[in-house]
Amino acid sequence: MSAVNITNVAVLDNPTAFLNPFQFEISYECLIPLDDDLEWKLIYVGSAEDENYDQQLESVLVGPVNVGTYRFVLQADPPDPSKIREEDIIGVTVLLLTCSYMGQEFMRVGYYVNNDYDDEQLREEPPAKLLIDRVQRNILADKPRVTKFPINFHPEPSTSAGQQQQEPQTASPENHTGGEGKIRYYISIGCVFGVPTCANGL
């Protein structure tokens, strides 16, 4: 059983302009006191084929973590459009919200993100040059893919840094409102892409 469970992720200010910040209201519970902080990351997948276009939008440490329930808002800047190929900005991509403890990732929430122009005429007749200030971002908050990784929440000091990640378990997203490289993404949220590499159920 995990020492930390995410009980809800609410996507705020959605849909919104591509250049607006991301905002997630995250609720979670801790079942045992933890000695270290939890690390939350938000990663924007700039290309399904090339991890070099991934952008880590935010990384925050939250602690101390005692037994109880918690809620906070994670805000992150939007991705830098200059670091994304122009042809990859319009269309569907993926956003990853991860949580780690002592360097061990134990939870990942993946979302579809649909980027398109905010005007019907622009959608029907896209301009030759991308108009980034007219692009709207829509996170499909009702269809997250939640993946759990079994980890040791009380590792020995000599082994915690180099502990090997275990095989992920993909959870059903029913209770939620709301990778390195192409292989990682397919393993962790493969069902989102339609690739049968993960199974439903805890």
Image: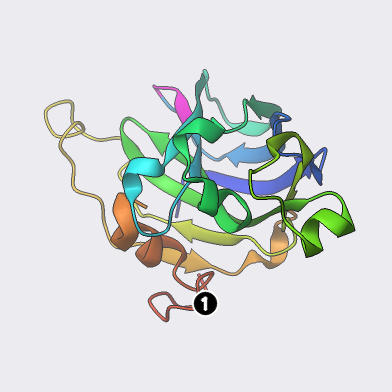
Q: Residue lying farthest bottom?
A: 196
Residue at x 51% of width, y 22% of height: 60
Q: Which residue is mark 1?
A: 200
Q: Residue lying farthest left?
A: 158
Report the predominant secondary structure element of the magenta stretch: loop
The number of numbered badges drawn on the structure is 1
Give neighbour class at mark 1: few <14, some 14-19, many 20+ (Cα, 10 Å).
Answer: few
**Residues shaded magenta:** 35-39
Secondary structure under the numbered disc 1 in the rendered image: loop
Residue at x 65% of width, y 28% of height: 74
Task: Decide which of 68, 84 is in the foreground and name it.
Answer: 84
- Check if residue 28 falls in the magenta segment: no
Residue 58 placement, left or right of 72: left
- Give the vertical position of 114 relative to 192 (above or below): above
Q: Residue lying farthest top?
A: 64
> x, y (%) of residue 49?
36, 59
- Check if residue 37 falls in the magenta segment: yes
Q: Which amino acid type corresponds to the residue marked 1 in the rendered image? A: Asn
Residue at x 18% of width, y 42% of height: 163
- Give the vertical position of 137 relative to 37 (above or below): below
Task: Decide which of 63, 134 is in the foreground and name it.
Answer: 134
Task: Decide which of 77, 118 is in the foreground and name it.
Answer: 118
